[in-house]
């Protein structure tokens, strides 16, 4: 019996390349701007980013939400 089934949270990764940019430039010119834009979406559980030389990775994990079931009997 599996008491804790494997659950995969809906996740989106935005990867952006800015060749030749320092980690600080990537953070201010790319990662922060993407985070600000994405942060307006509802249902976000976690928003984080990694900025390195020439590359930004922004991770967005959404809340798991159960779809509401229709009332009544006899199916969907």
Image (spheres, rainbow, N blue to C red):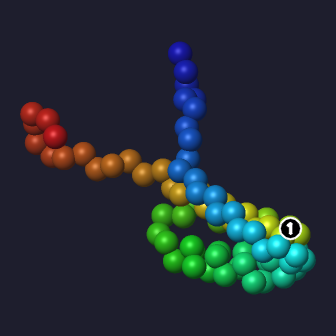
Q: Residues within 10 Å of mark 1 (few under 14, many from 20)?
A: some
- Asked whether, in this view, residue 74 is left or right of residue 32, the answer is left
User: On the image, which quarter does residue 76 sit in?
Assistant: top left
Number of numbered discs on residues? 1
**Vertical placement of residue 63 versus 27, above or below:** above
Say which element carries label 1: strand
Residue 55: image location, x then y, percent: 80, 67
Residue 67: image location, x then y, percent: 33, 49
Residue found at the very far front of the displayed protein? 19
**Vertical placement of residue 65 versus 23, above or below:** above
Residue 15: image location, x then y, percent: 69, 63
Q: Residue at x 51, y 55 (%)?
A: 63
Residue 9: image location, x then y, percent: 55, 47
Residue found at the very far top of the displayed protein? 1
Q: Residue at x 86, y 78 (%)?
A: 21
- Asked whether, in this view, residue 32 is left or right of residue 38, the answer is right
Q: Residue at x 53, y 16 (%)?
A: 1
- Asked whether, in this view, residue 44 is left or right of residue 68, the answer is right
From where the camera sits, is residue 17 visible? Answer: yes
Q: Residue at x 57, y 75 (%)?
A: 39
Residue closest to the eye, 51 or 68: 51
From where the camera sits, is residue 46 visible? Answer: no
Q: Which residue is label 1 attached to? A: 52
- Asked whether, in this view, residue 72 is left or right of residue 2, the answer is left
């Amino acid at each position: 019996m599996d008491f804790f089934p494997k659950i995969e949270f809906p996740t989106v990764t935005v990867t952006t390349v800015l060749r030749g940019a320092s980690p600080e430039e990537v953070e201010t010119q790319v990662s922060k701007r993407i985070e600000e834009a994405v942060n307006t979406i509802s249902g976000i559980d976690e928003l984080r980013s990694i900025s390195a030389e020439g590359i930004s990775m922004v991770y967005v994990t959404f809340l798991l939400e159960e779809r509401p079931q229709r009332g009544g009997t006899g199916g969907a």
